[in-house]
Amino acid sequence: MNRNNIDQALSALADALKGQEPPPINILQLVSQIPDRSLSGNHINGGKITGFSSTGIIDSATAPRLKVTDNAVTVENLNVGSIVSNTEFKGDVSIQGTARIKNLEVESLSADISITQNNSIKYEGQIDGKGFLWSGKDYTKQFVYQSGKIFSSENIDIAKGKQYSINDLKVIDQDSLGESVVKSNLREVGRLKGLVVDGQTIINNYFVFDANTDRFGIGTEEPNAALSIAEDGIEIIAGTVDATRGAIGTFGSHELDIVTDNVARIKIGSSGNILLGNRNSSPIQVSVHGKLAVKVNTPDPEVDLHVNGAIKFNGKLQKYDTVKPSSGEFNRGDIVWNSEPSVGSYVGWICTKSGNPGDWEPFGKIGN
């Protein structure tokens, strides 16, 4: 077949097909013929549906906002009035606004908190051990309620000028105790400016004030005078014998030394003997600015020395008697003065030879 025959055949076919061309399709007319709610999702695959609206959905988005996959539903921004079912969040949740939560239960809370509501933090149920805990690298710091009291594991420091009070009464501030503090069990204090103590007082078991007897003891719990100082079994007392006399000395049968420069200057023996001066030291000087009486209950005010008994001057005895001695040891130079002188008798007798009684001669004849 030549080229001309082919062209004639194609032209004839085209004329035949023109007669078979269907009329144009009117889409709007076609859609209007579909009954309401009769279009199945099986008829839609791919493509976009814009201006979509249903009873429960209104789509006014101009760009994709919701993505549904087998693993999740992804939404850029979610605006809901409420979530009514239990919800589990497995990722982080960031809330830019206010979260109002009726009940909050967390296993761990990390937050910078500023409480602006009027309500206080409230613990209900078992409250022992509830409070504030600060976990650190060494140990957990605590400020919690424990067995009827608040326990703090750390020091509590209040600002200068503030105070601790009980029932609106000051207990302690920076530098003073409140007047309501009347009892204490202090073990150590610093320097005291003034101290007033009522009742029994014991200081280190060595200083004792007996409130029942108004006596103060140092080294003794049972003072025997207004002031008692006990050491090495010897008690020195200072007080009164009665309402008219004071007393100072030893309470038991012990000697008493009055010392200067750590040397005994006056010694009083346990039986009452008195020694002025110290035998192991240089002789002392004793001055009596007044009248001196020995063994005299009522001294004569007209004399400076009143002695009731024998005396010795420079080792020589001088005594009074009615006769010369007839017994006893005497030394040469001893004198016995006549206590009953009369005319014709003698002023006294003098020992001219030591012995028992020695030799005695009268002297100083009275009268012619």
Image (cartoon, rainbow, N blue to C red):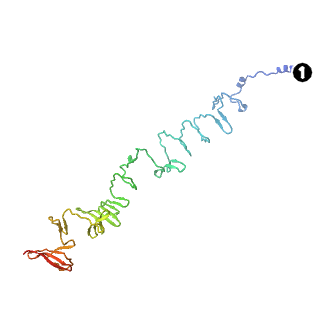
| Residue 239 lies in quadrant | bottom left
Is 14 or 16 nearer to us in this picture?
14
Estimate the x, y position of residue 37 in percent, counting from the top left: 68, 30
Res 359 visible: yes
Above or below for 246 versus 354: above
Q: Secondary structure at mark 1?
A: helix
Q: Is residue 108 left or right of residue 18?
A: left
Estimate the x, y position of residue 83 in percent, counting from the top left: 59, 38
Above or below for 44 versus 279: above
Name the image quarter holding the N terminus. Answer: top right
Q: Amino acid at mark 1?
A: Ile
Is 190 or 276 nearer to us in this picture?
276
Q: Is residue 63 left or right of residue 311?
A: right
Q: Which residue is mark 1?
A: 6
Residue shown at 65%/33% (left/top)? 66
Question: Residue farthest to the right?
Answer: 1
For the image, the number of numbered tags is 1
Estimate the x, y position of residue 262 in percent, counting from the top left: 32, 63
Name the image quarter holding the C terminus. Answer: bottom left
Question: Residue farthest to the left?
Answer: 368
Estimate the x, y position of residue 52 in percent, counting from the top left: 66, 29
Above or below for 74 versus 326: above
| Residue 257 lies in quadrant | bottom left
Res 224 visible: no
Is 90 or 53 nearer to us in this picture?
90
